Image (spheres, rainbow, N blue to C red):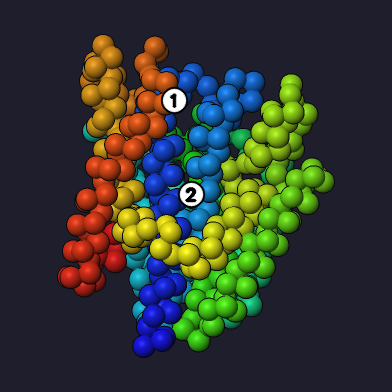
Amino acid sequence: MKETFLIKKRIQSIDILRGLVIIVMALDHTRDYFHSDAMIFAPLDLAKTTVPLFFTRWITHFCAPAFMFLAGTSAFLVGLRKTKKELSFFLLTRGLWLIFLELTFLNFGWTFNIHFPFFALGVIWALGVSMIVLSFLHYLPYSVILGIGILLVGGHNLLDSFHIPGNSFNSFIWSVLHDPTFANESNQLIIKDRAVIVDYPVLPWIGVIALGYCFGNLYKPDMDDRTRIKKLLILGSVAIFLFILLRFLNVYGDPRPWLTQKSTVFTILSWLKVTKYPPSLQFILLTVGTGILFLAVAEKYLDIFGKAIIRIGRVPMFFYLAHIYLIHTLALFAAKFSGYNWNDMISRKPLIPVINGYGFPLAMVYLVWLIVILLLYPLCKWYDDYKSRQKKWWLSYL
């Protein structure tokens, strides 16, 4: 009985974090389609942003790393009840399935363009590739997987100055590994007049999922509650300490060092503005470290965070797939209401449609975000109940 309770409790704490980050992720995507400034400048541009807008975007930085890290942890937990071969097959096939979803269902959801004028390789693509790599990595000894994770996360910034210009196949492969092309059209691979855009290079993300897999050892049934929470607090604190140390040194761990700005507040913003594409060492230390600390708190105070977040956290992929379509559909109505045409919200160039003069204040973005969550929660609850009742193998792929 005690062992069953512990497993259930651990799953709840992980689901709380997973649910929270996926909800916060929806805020960023709502901003993409509804905020007036989203059509003009990047929210982290310190020359143009405001403090509320900066933090609206910055808080969503915690989503992708937590999602990727917990995917590795979940793989470890799945492996407790599967053979090595079974886990390898599951990770390989689910990774291929996620890549397929990114190229088809999600690319259409972002654009609503049946002609698919471009293909964006985003976070689901990176998760799929990372799962495929993990399907082979998990055969290695624990210490080797941990070493590979540390090496990729801690050392990939040594490659920041290396670039392969042009849109050749070699430059594309390097983009897939480490050099994103969404902001550099000259480096985008062109296939039959369609650009292939790399938003999420996979090298550091493979490191994150590998570390998440090793992290799963803390959730084995024989791990004592107090021991685990103590280790979570130590790991999270060490990661945050290393982030603060590296940030103050301002030498390594992020390709864009912080600079003194026009005011103390904006200097702090510069200090917090770590690089996500690809995720720098400092970015990963901050986001994953915070996530680990949150897990310790969530496990101790489960009831405070509520069962609603757990419901969403149990079906994060279902929420992710649905929220893109819902937000984009609401944006169609918003554009029409604002005096524009429906087809103005159909993307022809990467990634979000740009409509001159369209958009709403930041407060409206938060209101729409709340509406999105309220609309999706009943669907997530229904799907979570359906998964619990049916126990069909294919449900584990969503």
Give the label on residue 362, or none. 1
Measured Cα–Cα span from mark 2 to mark 1: 20 Å
Residue drawn at point x = 50 percent, y = 76 percent: 219
| Residue toward you, 132 or 392 | 392
Mark 2 or 1: in front is: 1
| Residue toward you, 155 or 360 | 360
Amino acid found under the numbered disc labelled 2: Cys
Q: Position of residue 184 (x, y in %)?
A: 55, 30
Q: Quadrant of residue 330?
A: top left
Q: How many marks?
A: 2
Q: Quadrant of residue 290?
A: bottom right
Mark 2 lies on residue: 63
Q: Position of residue 188 (x, y in %)?
A: 50, 35
Amino acid found under the numbered disc labelled 1: Leu
Q: Of helix, strand and loop, which one carries label 1?
A: helix
Residue drawn at point x = 23 percent, y = 24 percent: 333
